Amino acid sequence: MIAYLILVHRYPCQFKRLFRAIFHPANYYLVHVDKRAGVGLQTEIQDFLSSFANASLLKSQSILWGGYSMVDAELRGIEELLKISSEWEFFINLSGQDFPLKSQTHIQDFLSCNIGNDFIKVANQSKIRPDTLYRIENYYIEFSNRILRTPMKRPYLRGVTPYIGNQWMIMSRKSCEFVCYSSEVKRFKRFYRHTFIPDEGFFQTVIMNTNYEGTFVNDDKRTIVWVPIGTIKLRPKDFTSKDAEFLLASQGLYARKFDETVDAGILSILESNLS
């Protein structure tokens, strides 16, 4: 039913709790460990996954926040999951600091009633988030451990309207096949390789500007509380035990984010609710 891609760069114990919470023998699991996290984390997670026949590791590459390497990891993950099995109907991406709010049975029942739908937040970037247009107007280079913003400007894709949303999504198998294999997508991949934070706009822009025929729901089914850093930038709040009532009442299927070094108790509360 579900193919999961989980992106991990730290906290192996927290990842294991997440994995157990979303595990179901009918699902498929692919885990990417950021190469920059080191061999130790990679080995520990590989050893853990060896006990699960329906789980495997994606070849590790370095991922920089804000760089195309994030999109690349997701595209590689989707393509690998398509090769692994022809049985799953939905792709779901998670980070190692996410956690489910509903059981796998609940999630599978929900998705069974939504076969063919894509759940992804979509907004016209020029109209709704014009403050982010610099991400696609300047030419960016992912170099070593940095994202370099060059002074060079370039025209946007001809005949294309830029869209934006969140990185997190629930995509139908049909849309996954389209993004991986359609020749229409090649120019989007070339352009977004040199943009900033493309993981929040690439998939949305492809879906809204190609001949892909699907039904998208403007909802990623995630519960996230955004808090400001400075004047404009936002980051997801770290949920704690004080947020338990809010999370348990949420209609989201997953929430982010959680940090076991800040409050591991909230994970125990959610685990108890799932069981």
Image (tube, rainbow, N blue to C red):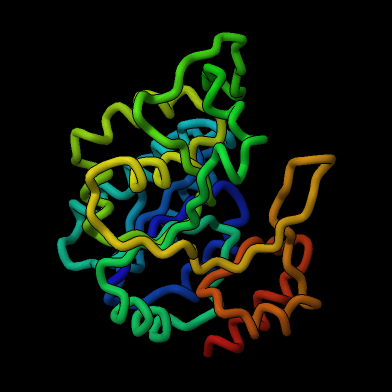
Residue, x 73% and y 84% (percent of image)?
A: 245
Question: Number of numbered discs present?
Answer: 0
Can residue 72 be seen from the camera position used here? yes
Q: Position of residue 259 (x, y in %)?
A: 70, 61
Residue, x 35% and y 84% (percent of image)?
A: 109
Residue 260 quadrant: bottom right
Extreme-right residue of the structure: 230
Residue, x 54% and y 13% (percent of image)?
A: 153
Asked if 196 appears above or below 93 in the picture, the reply is: above
Extreme-top residue of the structure: 152
Asked if 222 appears above or below 81 in the picture, the reply is: below
Q: Position of residue 118 (x, y in %)?
A: 35, 62
Asked if 68 appears above or below 209 in the picture, the reply is: above
Residue, x 61% and y 23% (percent of image)?
A: 146
Asked if 257 appears above or below 33 in the picture, the reply is: below
Extreme-left residue of the structure: 86
In the shown orientation, is residue 223 left or right of residue 124? right
In the shown orientation, is residue 63 left or right of residue 5? right
Instruction: Judge by depth and name the residue closer to the eye, 60 or 44.
Output: 60
Q: Position of residue 83 (x, y in %)?
A: 18, 51
In the shown orientation, is residue 206 left or right of residue 121? left
